[in-house]
């Protein structure tokens, strides 16, 4: 799509938004209902597209993408009227007689840029929140997931007029053209490198941004943990979507005294969940493209592989792999892995682990497996991270009742449920002052008596 065409889309959406058409709650609810119905009708096509792009099974496609979007739609439709209500706040005595309130209002024309690893979920869920808040939206899905991106474009064209919600497909040229436009809010999910570029380009227009990035999310295993259950849950979260999950445990950081037992249990769990030949398992996905396949293989040190390590370049698959004897200086610890490699590092004390984690960029997630409430409290209180779990992984993002997002290097802003509505809304602070009286003390000429009254009112 040309830059001129993109510019025209933004102009049409701005003109449409300024008519006030998107502001009514009935209009928003009808839009959410249309989107929900469209997703249900196209469910099989969505799962087919996810399999074509990433090798995802229909079960995983529903569990991790389609079902979660439908859940957010259902939640938002139930709660939208409550979220959109004006909220009264206390009025200071000095402003007598008046009513003070906060009024949620849409930003206007928004841009949603989504990634390839969960292409349906991470496009549609922020779109649900944008629509619920009363915005128009330009959606830019990833070029690395072409089947899902093209299907979403067709679905959205059937649901909405282009002046309300529009999809721009393509690659870097389209991304660059979009970032030249003036939006009222940009919502970006992706890598830290691209996130920095989005933020830099947005700054030219003073456009607010929400960045959902990633990072190296640690999975701490304390010596008091239920190791068998920890191994089962870690294997699930790490190798889900072949490790291409922004909140996957990037590495295991465990007490030295339980490391060998944990490695043994991880190997058993990989075989139990994926079979002895995972590359032949029809429910085990693949790496998105050859570029990332090669990048992941280059992070693997064969001398430190204690399980897995096999790969198939024709199918872009890498066997679930465990690496032992890893240190923070190894190449695999130099970047977010975003693939099915699980490095194991060890510590001698919880204090050492906390210090080491805090020396590094803030991760998007942190997981702690422990039987000690004190240890769990220490890690969740003292470490900086976006969100996480105690004695589980990944599942903290699977609810509309809690916000999801990072801070610092792992992003800024959050969404899901009420927080998603708030993310796409500006809260206007308004004082509605009555006209039947007008206290004279604020007007010149100032008098000594009025100063005493001002001081009394404002204490």
Image: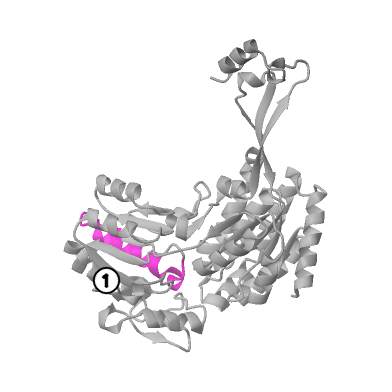
Q: Position of residue 283 (x, y in %)?
A: 46, 74
* The stretch drawn in magenta includes residue 243: yes
How has the structure been colored for display? Answer: one colour
Name the quadrant of the N terminus: bottom right
Location of mark 1 (residue): 327
Nearer-the-camera pick, 48 or 4? 4
Residue at the spot 53% in from the left edge and 19% down from the top edge: 459
Nearer-the-camera pick, 278 or 149? 149
> Is 20 above or below relative to 7?
above
Secondary structure at numbered mark 1: loop
Q: Position of residue 219 (x, y in %)?
A: 33, 61
* Residue 347 seen in the current view: yes
Q: Position of residue 175 (x, y in %)?
A: 65, 71
Q: Position of residue 364 (x, y in %)?
A: 44, 59
* Residue 171 seen in the current view: no
Q: Quadrant of residue 50?
A: bottom right
Left or right: where 218 falls relative to 152: left
Residue at the spot 51% in from the left edge and 69% down from the top edge: 193
Residue at the spot 26% in from the left edge and 67% down from the top edge: 345
* Main SS of residues in magenta: helix
Farthest-out residue, top: 449
Left or right: where 10 falls relative to 400: right
Q: Residues within 10 Å of mark 1 (few under 14, many from 20)?
A: few
Left or right: where 459 falls relative to 306: right
């Amino acid at each position: 799509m040309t830059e001129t065409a993109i510019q025209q889309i933004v102009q049409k959406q701005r003109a449409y938004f300024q008519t006030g058409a998107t502001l009514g709650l009935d209009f928003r609810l009808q839009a959410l209902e249309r989107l929900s119905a469209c997703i249900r009708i196209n469910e099989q096509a969505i799962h087919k597209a996810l399999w074509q792009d990433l090798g995802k099974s229909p079960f995983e496609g529903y569990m991790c993408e389609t079902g979660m979007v439908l859940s957010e739609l259902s939640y938002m439709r139930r709660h939208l009227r409550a979220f959109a209500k004006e909220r009264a706040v206390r009025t200071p005595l000095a402003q007598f007689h008046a009513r003070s309130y906060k009024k949620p209002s849409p930003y206007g024309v928004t841009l949603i840029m989504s990634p390839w690893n969960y292409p349906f979920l991470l496009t549609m869920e922020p779109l649900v929140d944008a629509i619920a808040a009363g915005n128009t939206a330009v959606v830019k899905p990833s070029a690395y997931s072409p089947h899902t991106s093209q299907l979403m474009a067709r679905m959205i064209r059937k649901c909405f007029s282009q002046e309300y919600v529009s999809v721009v497909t393509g690659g870097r040229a389209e991304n660059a053209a979009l970032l030249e436009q003036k939006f009222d809010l940009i919502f970006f999910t992706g890598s830290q490198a691209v996130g920095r570029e989005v933020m830099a380009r947005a700054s030219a227009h003073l456009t607010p941004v929400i960045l959902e990035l990633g990072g190296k999310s640690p999975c701490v295993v304390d010596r008091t943990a239920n190791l068998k259950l920890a191994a089962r849950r870690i294997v699930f979260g790490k190798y889900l979507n072949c490790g291409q999950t922004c909140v996957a445990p990037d590495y295991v950081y465990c007490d030295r005294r339980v490391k060998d037992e944990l490695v043994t249990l991880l190997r058993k769990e990989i075989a139990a969940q994926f079979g002895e030949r995972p590359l032949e398992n029809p429910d085990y996905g693949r790496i998105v493209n050859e570029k990332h396949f090669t990048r992941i293989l280059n992070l693997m040190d064969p001398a430190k592989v204690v399980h897995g390590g096999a790969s198939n370049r024709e199918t872009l698959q890498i066997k679930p792999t465990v690496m032992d004897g890893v240190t923070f200086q190894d190449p695999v610890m130099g970047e977010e892995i975003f693939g099915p490699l699980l490095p194991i590092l060890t510590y001698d004390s919880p204090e050492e682990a906390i210090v080491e984690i805090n020396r590094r960029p803030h991760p998007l997630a942190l997981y702690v497996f422990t039987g000690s409430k004190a240890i769990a409290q220490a890690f969740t209180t003292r470490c900086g991270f976006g969100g996480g779990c105690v004695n589980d992984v990944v599942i903290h993002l699977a609810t509309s009742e809690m916000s999801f997002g990072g801070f610092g290097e792992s992003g800024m802003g959050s969404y899901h449920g009420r927080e998603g509505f708030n993310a796409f809304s500006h809260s206007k602070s308004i004082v509605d002052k009555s006209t039947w009286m007008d206290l004279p003390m604020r007007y010149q000429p100032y008098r000594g008596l009025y100063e005493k009254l001002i001081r009394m009112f404002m204490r």
